[in-house]
Image (cartoon, rainbow, N blue to C red):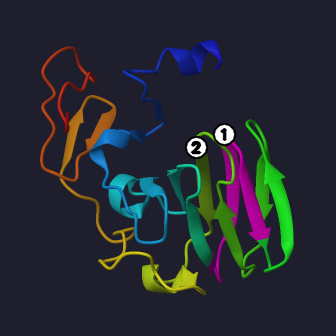
Amino acid sequence: MSASTAGNATAGNATAGNATATKVSLCDVPVDHRRGGAIQLLLSPRSAGATSGFMGVGVLQPGEFVIEHHHPYSEEFIYVVSGTLTARIDGDRHVELRPDDGLLIPKGTPHRFENNGAEPAKVVFHNGPLAPRPELGHVDTEPLLEEGPPPDVGGPAGPVSTVGPVSTVSPVGPVSTAGPAGASTGGMP
């Protein structure tokens, strides 16, 4: 971070010109188990006003998997934070992933993730560009593991609280912003 950028940082957020950075905490977004593992969409059009893609975190316990699917409009970028995963690409190609490995999955390519290791695996993923409509962006090629509505990726952002250059989105209501300008002390516990 340059000295000029560092001067704009406030509680982990920053501004660039007139743009406002948006902070979203993992504890404030719902967990989706429908496709396997614990998947959380952290930064998306809905949660952060993203316009070019979305980012999330996935945790797979030993023996868990994410069902095979593909993204007709998006590439998927995977970064393994901890644990090990096997990515099954296009049905038969297996790629072993360890901490600090990255994987790029081209748009339209079927893929599935499996934790065959002895410890939880944590990944950060990013998909982009966005599909024309959220329901077109993800195609499952195996049955869902749990019923329920899909995650709310797109649409207008939820309630927003702005203090100075920081915008904090909370899916459960306005965020308390007591304290110094830009310091968020609210959200879900």
The answer to whether mark 2 and mark 1 are in CB contact below 8 A is yes
Q: Residue at x 16, y 38 (%)?
A: 175
- Whether residue 165 is situated above or below residue 46 in the rendered picture: above
Residue 85 coordinates in the image, percent (x, y): 71, 52
Q: Which residue is mark 1?
A: 83
Q: Estimate how packed mark 2 is, as few (under 14), some (14 to 19) or many (20 or more) residues with alpha carbons within 10 Å.
A: many
Placement of the C terminus among the 4 image quadrants: top left
**Mark 2 vs mark 1, CA separation in Å:** 6 Å
- Whether residue 156 is situated above or below residue 61 in the rendered picture: below
Q: Is residue 158 magenta?
A: no
Q: Could you tell me if residue 24 is visible in this image?
A: no
Q: Which residue is mark 2?
A: 122
Residue 37 coordinates in the image, percent (x, y): 49, 58
Please identify the dominant SS of the magenta region: strand
Q: Quadrant of residue 22?
A: top left
Magenta segment, which residues?
69-88
Q: Amino acid at mark 1?
A: Gly
Q: Residue at x 46, y 57 (%)?
A: 39
**Element assignment for label 2:** strand
